[in-house]
Image: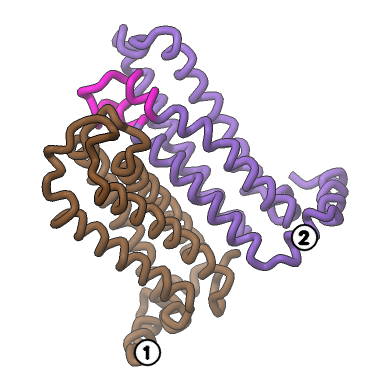
């Protein structure tokens, strides 16, 4: 997607003092990318641990609710760091990201996985055995785990591909 | 550099040439490399934070590492393989890149720290039990050292992309 309005918006961002500062400070982009990747590491490891439990592959000695209580806060508290560091990178080079279809795909995948995560976390918070009560739900949560993992893998791959498209 | 003939040979291999010439191979290798590294660093951080006494305090270190470390090793194998493949596509320039050299040094130090934990610091790990108070000071130091080293690996790794003589390098 590329529109005149988006072009104008990018041009406006590039003239802001913050964008100018990032553009002339050569270490700022790799430094912020490092923070961004470290935050992704926290999210990805947590997502993997949680989803492997949802799949029944790992940690079956503890209930889903317990594993979720351990890793859910990491996911939600790290997202703001990701959004902030990501926003700084966008401000520094708005055209590189905002007008890039891979970046747009990444944001679509991100929104999808956030909705999916909320969709299984909300019932789990009300009833800690929710995903264990019926065969259908036990199947559904495994499917959710696979889709969720695939979405996160897609997000990370898309993130690196932004640099090449 | 003494090993330059080796790096030149790697560069000239068929694999090196294919990765250099194919437009989408290098970005895919890099994407998978980053994915694997996030899992390596994130999973190691789960263990380190337990050692320091920050989180997962309801499980023993032994129980936690039994769950986490197999994932760490699988991810590390993937990171190593993709890393080697990217390296050979531009071997001489990587080998001469300061940030690459420091990254490898930090990796070696992280490996030594891990071996030291395995054979010295954590020899009595099975007796540490649950709750924060049970990890000895030496385990907290080992955990903190590991975290710092891996943060360094990621940082210097990212800097390579901005300083390397290019063949196919994304910023």
Q: Position of residue A11 (x, y in %)?
A: 85, 53
SS category of the residue bearing label 1: helix
Q: Look at mark 2 in the image and give the residue it sits on.
A: A21
Task: Please indicate, yes or no, whether residue B18 appears anywhere in the rendered image.
Answer: no
Indicate the quadrant where residue B161 lies: bottom right
Instruction: Please state if A110 lies on the left or on the right of B104 as rendered.
Output: right
Q: What SS does tag 2 mark? A: helix
Q: Nearer the viewer, residue B93 or A34?
A: A34
Colour of the chain lettered A:
purple
Quadrant containing the N terminus of chain B in the rendered view: bottom left
Q: Residue A53: in sight, yes or no?
A: yes
**Relative to B26, residue B64 above or below:** above
Coloring scheme used: by chain
Judge whether residue A57 is colored magenta. yes
Q: What is the x, y in percent for residue A103?
A: 64, 47
Q: Residue at x 31, y 7 (%)?
A: A133
| Residue at (61% x, 36% y) in the render | A108
Residue behind mark 1 = B4
Question: Magenta span has B67?
Answer: no
- A125 or B129, which lies in front? B129
Instruction: Kindly check if marks 2 and 1 are in contact, taking CB atoms under 8 A apart as contact.
Output: no
- Image quarter where the C terminus of chain B lies is bottom right
Report the side of B62 relative to A137 (left or right). Answer: left
> Are there few (<14), some (14-19), or many (20+) residues within 10 Å of tag 1?
some
Q: Which chain is brown?
A: B
User: Residue B44, how many percent across, how many down?
Assistant: 33, 48
Q: In front here: A115 or B72? A: B72
Chain that bears disc 2: A
- Give me the disc on residue A6: none
Point out the stretch of residues depicted in magenta.
A50-70
What number of labels is visible? 2
């Amino acid at each position: 997607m590329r529109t005149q309005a988006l072009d104008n918006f990018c041009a406006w961002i590039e003239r802001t003092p913050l964008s100018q500062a990032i553009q002339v400070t050569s270490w700022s982009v790799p430094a912020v990318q490092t923070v961004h990747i470290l935050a992704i590491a926290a999210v990805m490891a947590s997502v993997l641990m949680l989803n492997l439990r949802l799949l029944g592959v790992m940690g079956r000695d503890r209930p889903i609710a317990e594993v979720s209580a351990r890793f859910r806060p990491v996911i939600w508290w790290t997202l703001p760091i990701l959004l902030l560091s990501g926003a700084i990178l966008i401000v520094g080079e708005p055209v590189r990201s905002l007008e890039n279809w891979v970046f747009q795909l990444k944001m679509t995948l991100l929104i999808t996985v956030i909705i999916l995560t909320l969709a299984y976390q909300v019932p789990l918070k009300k009833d800690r055995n929710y995903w264990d009560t019926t065969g259908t739900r036990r199947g559904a949560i495994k499917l959710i785990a696979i889709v969720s993992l695939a979405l996160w893998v897609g997000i990370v791959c898309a993130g690196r591909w932004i640099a090449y498209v | 550099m003494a090993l330059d003939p080796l790096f030149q040979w790697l560069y000239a291999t068929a694999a090196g040439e294919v990765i250099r010439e194919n437009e989408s191979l290098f970005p895919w290798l890099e994407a998978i490399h980053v994915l694997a590294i996030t899992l390596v660093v994130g999973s190691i951080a789960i263990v380190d934070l337990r050692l320091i006494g920050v989180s997962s305090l309801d499980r023993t270190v032994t129980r936690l590492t039994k769950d986490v470390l197999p994932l760490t090793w699988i991810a590390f194998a993937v990171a190593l393989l993709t890393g080697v493949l990217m390296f050979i596509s531009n071997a001489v320039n990587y080998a001469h890149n300061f940030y690459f050299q420091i990254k490898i040094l930090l990796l070696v130090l992280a490996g030594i720290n891990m071996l030291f934990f395995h054979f010295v610091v954590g020899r009595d790990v099975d007796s540490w039990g649950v709750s924060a108070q049970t990890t000895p000071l030496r385990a907290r130091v080992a955990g903190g050292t590991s975290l710092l080293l891996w943060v360094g690996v990621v940082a210097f790794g990212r800097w390579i992309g901005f300083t390397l003589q290019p063949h196919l390098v994304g910023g």
